[in-house]
Image: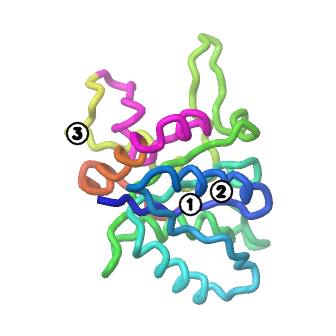
Amino acid sequence: MAKNVFISFRFADGYAYKNRLANLFDAYNDTVDYSEDQDRSRMSEETIRQYLYKKLKRSSVTIVLLTPLAVNHNHNWRGEYDDWIYDEIRYSLEDRVGNNTNGLIAVYTPEAADMVMSKNDDSSICVKDVDNLFRKNMMNVKPLYKTNPSPGLYDRDYDSYCSLLSWSEFTGNIGKYIDIATNKHNATYKYDIVKRL
């Protein structure tokens, strides 16, 4: 059965990466790309919402491309979120008539790696606390379903609703990670999903 995906990206610095991903999906007969590359900067909030609802209705996995301009959400002058990526993620996570919560994958590009990941003194790698909805959906598995039984340790594939992957990890095994996200899409009850900031 085909896996239908939607790619969320920042138009200014993610368009080339989005196109590279779309071309890679062409090699997978079971992956259909339902994302778009239309600049929506002049659309009203309601028009954007309805437009995205139609796109997302046909997908089951949302892939967020984390380029430097997409790591943190934008705010308007009142401090409210004013960001298409934020809208795309939150609409992806909504469970509404005709649309179940999408699986979620965040893929950071090499240019954004230092903005997303950091190295501790003990050389372990940790995820930075960025202002992005994908981050709120990590390490959020309910205790009953936790794969790694050790307190404070999480299985990177299954103990977060959102899988966070480097560009090379994701593109090196696209089918695996889309399958994992699809499995989580079919088991949302196992996670405390944060649907808006």
Query: Left or right: where does residue 91 sit relative to residue 40?
Result: left
Residue in the image at 31% along x and 81% along y: 97
- Is 165 included in the stretch rendered in magenta? yes
- Between the C-alphas of marks 3 and 2, the distance is 33 Å
In the picture, the disc for residue 18 is 2
Dot 2 amino acid type: Lys
Residue in the image at 70% along x and 79% along y: 40
In the picture, the disc for residue 145 is 3
Question: Relative to residue 65, is residue 166 depicted above or below?
Answer: above
Residue in front for this viewpoint, 153 or 12: 12
| Percent coordinates x, y for residue 90 in the rendering | 50, 66
- Is 104 included in the stretch rendered in magenta? no
What span is colored magenta in the figure?
Answer: 150-176
Furthest residue to the top?
122
Dot 3 amino acid type: Tyr
Label 1 close to label 2 by CB (< 8 Å): yes
Q: Quadrant of residue 74?
A: bottom right
